Structure formats: structure tokens, C-alpha cells
Image (tube, helix red, strand yellow):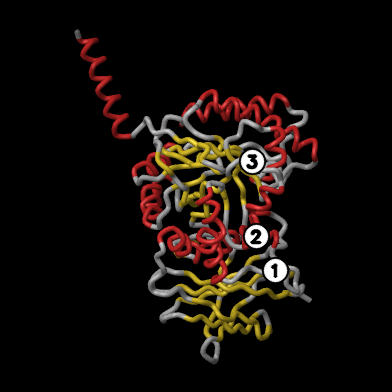
């Protein structure tokens, strides 16, 4: 009798959990006329997403998801799984968000995470280890109601050393896709690469994919649909990373440093990308969603260029995501840098003019980045500089760092609402005599 009661209690508990979690939720990509539809529980769904790193680990995930939901975000994208994944999925589910769960596959050459490099042509044991690890993560998380789909790899084709390596990876990818689908029939599988580089290889070697994941930056997003067609694409696609023009394609200034887009452009490209570049393709069933890069609190070179937050301060992308997905404009108006100019350098100090259009007061500071540094950590680091007000309004004296070469100089202005405006320029610091 005790055993029967325990069994009954277990059934009731399982039933309650299934009801609470909505564990029967299923995602599907279905053909619809000349396009496709992404469906969640049989209802149309468009991913209004951001890529997600978070602001401080699992302890902050609940607040992070609550804030993102308020911005109109309904989906998060991760690059891989880890010990924090259960907490993220739980927080996302609590706030009605779905997750495109990343399943990391190793790049084929240095340049990505930890400068890893994997030989897809020769390392059969390593391929099998990656396959088994991927399937294990799918088994672990496939029944969680926050899972929307699986995203295999990130720019592995871009980061492959040669054509044989690309083909070997693509053949392996097909094997992984089939294994994932065998374990989980309830969620679509896509793979992610830069622009349309992956499309010809996916079409030839990875027929089991349900959709493409395309990482795209800048105004080129308007040309993407035609590029997919020209590359032979026959499946729907997600924009799995998007933001302002990236450093890798930006023009360089006289000192050889990439010119960072102004804050206004960073804002405009996101709103324009979703509302104008993608809207017709979402309507036609070619594009299934967008993920803006990136929700994190990192105060570094990449965070200031592309992030939604820098530390606790909101960057233009934060407000652009909200306007794109909800139509809500920032209030009060964001501070707008109109000039950052180095007027002279003397005895280790720079005379700087920095003008910002905003309702005062503003907390103004300056920082630098050394893009030519020897290590990745140094190249990413943004370091605050000592500064003091100059003799005239809008001018400052800024102490230069003890480095040699071209530095990127930031003028930073934070308003009372927690918005951070940034302008950049460069200057050359000569070697000490």
C-alpha cells in the first residue's frame, strides 16, 4: 500500500510539474506557401531576440530576464552550455522567454574562444568526443520548456584554415545534426556562421539542417536575403548576431585604427535592421527571427562598441532593441556626443574638447584602449584615465597612459538616467626619449 501511495504521489507531482512548466511545448518550422513558419505549440512565433552573456552569473539571471522581457525581447541566444544553463533556462521560463540553446563546436583555427584550434580532417577521436558531448547536452536539456531550438557551432566555417577543413567540418556537422534529431524530435536544429559563408556547404553536405543561423553586422543586412539566394540557400534563416558595423569591416583612420560608428548610428542600424531590412522577409517567411548582440555588462572594447550595457550603464543598443521590438523611444532623450577632439599634447597630458548634447548634469570621464597590445586581454581592456576640467567649458586635461603607439581614446558621458554616451578618436603616443 505504501508503494502504491508513493507511486500515486509521484504521478501527481509529475503531472503538476508538467502543467506548471508546459513541458509538452514543441517548436517546429513548417512550410507555408513559398516560405516557412516558426511555430510554438502550433502558433506562429517570430524570435525577437538578443544574444545573452548576462550581467553577473546565475544570481542575476532572474533580473536580467525580467528586464529583457520589458524591452520586448522574447528569445535569448547562447553559444554553448555550462553549469549556468539550468539557471538561465529556469529564469527564462519564469519570464516567458525562450532560448536558442547554443551547442559549442570547436573552431578550426585560432581567433575565437581561447584561440582554440581543432583538426576536423584528422582528429577522429576528437570528433567523436564532440559528438557525444553534444548529444549529452541535448539529452540533458531537451525537455525544458524554455528551449526553442538548438544552435550548432558558431562561425566554425569562417574559422577553418582551408577548404578540406571546411568540408570535413560540414560532413561532421551533418552527423551531429542527425544525432541531435534522433534524441530530440521536438526542436529544430540550425547551425551558425558568418554572413552566407556556410550556405553552400550546408546545402551540399548538411541536408538535415532545419534552418541557417547567419551572423551579420551593419547596413549590409539589407543585402542579406539576396546573398542567401545567390549562395544557393533553400531554407529559412535566423539572424543569430546583429549590430552596428563591426571592427573587422570598419574603415581605418590615419593611425590604422578601425573607426567606430557613432552612437546614433549604432542605435539606428538596429531599429532599421528589424523594421525595414528584415520585416519583408519575416512577413514572407524567409527570416524567422533576429538576435541583437549582446546583453552583458562587460566594460571592454567589444562591450562599448556593440554591447547593450557597459557596467551598470545603458548603451544605445539597449534602447534600440526596445524601440525595434516595441516602438518605445527613450525618455529622456539619450545624450549625444557631437565632438571628441585632441587639441594638443604636452608633458604626458592631452588637451581634449568633448561636447555632448544632453540635459545636465553629466558625469564625464575618459579612457583608452591599446588595440596593438601583445595579448588578447590587453587588446580588449578599457582603462579609465585621470582627467580634470580645462580652462574653458567643454575642455579637459587628460593624463595619457605610459604606453607607446596608437591608442583609442574614449570620451564617456553618463546622464542621470544611467545612459552612457561614448565618442572615440585616436592619438599616437611616441616612445619615451
Q: Position of residue 116 (x, y in %)?
A: 69, 41
Distance from label 2 to label 1 (Cα)?
36 Å
Q: Marks 1 and 3, how far apart in space?
A: 51 Å
Crowding at mark 2 (Cα within 10 Å: few <14, some 14-19, many 20+): some
Local secondary structure at mark 3: loop
- For the image, the number of numbered tags is 3
Select label 1 or label 3 by which is in front: 3
Can residue 367 be seen here? The reply is yes
In the figure, 279 relative to 413: above or below? above
Q: Position of residue 253 (x, y in %)?
A: 73, 72
Which mark, residue 234? 3
Q: Secondary structure at mark 2?
A: helix
The CA distance from mark 2 to mark 3 is 20 Å
Query: Which one is nearer the viewer's eye here, 198 or 278?
Result: 278
Q: Nearer the viewer, residue 13 or 145?
A: 145
Question: In terms of sequence position, does the residue under pointer 2 or pointer 3 come before the other?
Answer: 2
Q: Which residue is mark 1?
A: 403
Amino acid at each position: 500500500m505504501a508503494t502504491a501511495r508513493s507511486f500515486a504521489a509521484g504521478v501527481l507531482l509529475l503531472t503538476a510539474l508538467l502543467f506548471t512548466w508546459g513541458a509538452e511545448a514543441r517548436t517546429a518550422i513548417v512550410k507555408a506557401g513559398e516560405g516557412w513558419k516558426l511555430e510554438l505549440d502550433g502558433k506562429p512565433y517570430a524570435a525577437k531576440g538578443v544574444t545573452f552573456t548576462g550581467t553577473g552569473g546565475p544570481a542575476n539571471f532572474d533580473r536580467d530576464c525580467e528586464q529583457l522581457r520589458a524591452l520586448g525581447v522574447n528569445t535569448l541566444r547562447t553559444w554553448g552550455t555550462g553549469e549556468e544553463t539550468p539557471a538561465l533556462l529556469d529564469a527564462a521560463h519564469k519570464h516567458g522567454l525562450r532560448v536558442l540553446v547554443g551547442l559549442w563546436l570547436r573552431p578550426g583555427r585560432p581567433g575565437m574562444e581561447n584561440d582554440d584550434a581543432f583538426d576536423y580532417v584528422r582528429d577522429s577521436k576528437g570528433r567523436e568526443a564532440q559528438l557525444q558531448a553534444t548529444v549529452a547536452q541535448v539529452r540533458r536539456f531537451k525537455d525544458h520548456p524554455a528551449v526553442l531550438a538548438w544552435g550548432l557551432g558558431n562561425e566554425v566555417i569562417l574559422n577553418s584554415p582551408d577548404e578540406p577543413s571546411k568540408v570535413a567540418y560540414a560532413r561532421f556537422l551533418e552527423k551531429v545534426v542527425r544525432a541531435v534529431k534522433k534524441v530530440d524530435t521536438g526542436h529544430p536544429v540550425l547551425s551558425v556562421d558568418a554572413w552566407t559563408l556556410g550556405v553552400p556547404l550546408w546545402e551540399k553536405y548538411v541536408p538535415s539542417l532545419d534552418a541557417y543561423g547567419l551572423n551579420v553586422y551593419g547596413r549590409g543586412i539589407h543585402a542579406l536575403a539576396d546573398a542567401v539566394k545567390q549562395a544557393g540557400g533553400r531554407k529559412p534563416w535566423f539572424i543569430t548576431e546583429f549590430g552596428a558595423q563591426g571592427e573587422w569591416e570598419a574603415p581605418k583612420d590615419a593611425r590604422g585604427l578601425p573607426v567606430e560608428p557613432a552612437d546614433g548610428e549604432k542605435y539606428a542600424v538596429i531599429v532599421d535592421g528589424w523594421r525595414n531590412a528584415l520585416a519583408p522577409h519575416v512577413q514572407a517567411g524567409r527570416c524567422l527571427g533576429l538576435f541583437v548582440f549582446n546583453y552583458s555588462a562587460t566594460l571592454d572594447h567589444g562591450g562599448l562598441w556593440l554591447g547593450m550595457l557597459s557596467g551598470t550603464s545603458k548603451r544605445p543598443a539597449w534602447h534600440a532593441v526596445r524601440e525595434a521590438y516595441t516602438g518605445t523611444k527613450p525618455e529622456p532623450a539619450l545624450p549625444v556626443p557631437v565632438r571628441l577632439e585632441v587639441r594638443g599634447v604636452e608633458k604626458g597630458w592631452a588637451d581634449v574638447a568633448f561636447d555632448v548634447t544632453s540635459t545636465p548634469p553629466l558625469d564625464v570621464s575618459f579612457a583608452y584602449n591599446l588595440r596593438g597590445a601583445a595579448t588578447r586581454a590587453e587588446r580588449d581592456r578599457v582603462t579609465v584615465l585621470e582627467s580634470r576640467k580645462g580652462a574653458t567649458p567643454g575642455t579637459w586635461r587628460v593624463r595619457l597612459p605610459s604606453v607607446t603607439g596608437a591608442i583609442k581614446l574614449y570620451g564617456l558621458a553618463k546622464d542621470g538616467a544611467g545612459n552612457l554616451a561614448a565618442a572615440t578618436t585616436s592619438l599616437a603616443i611616441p616612445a619615451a626619449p
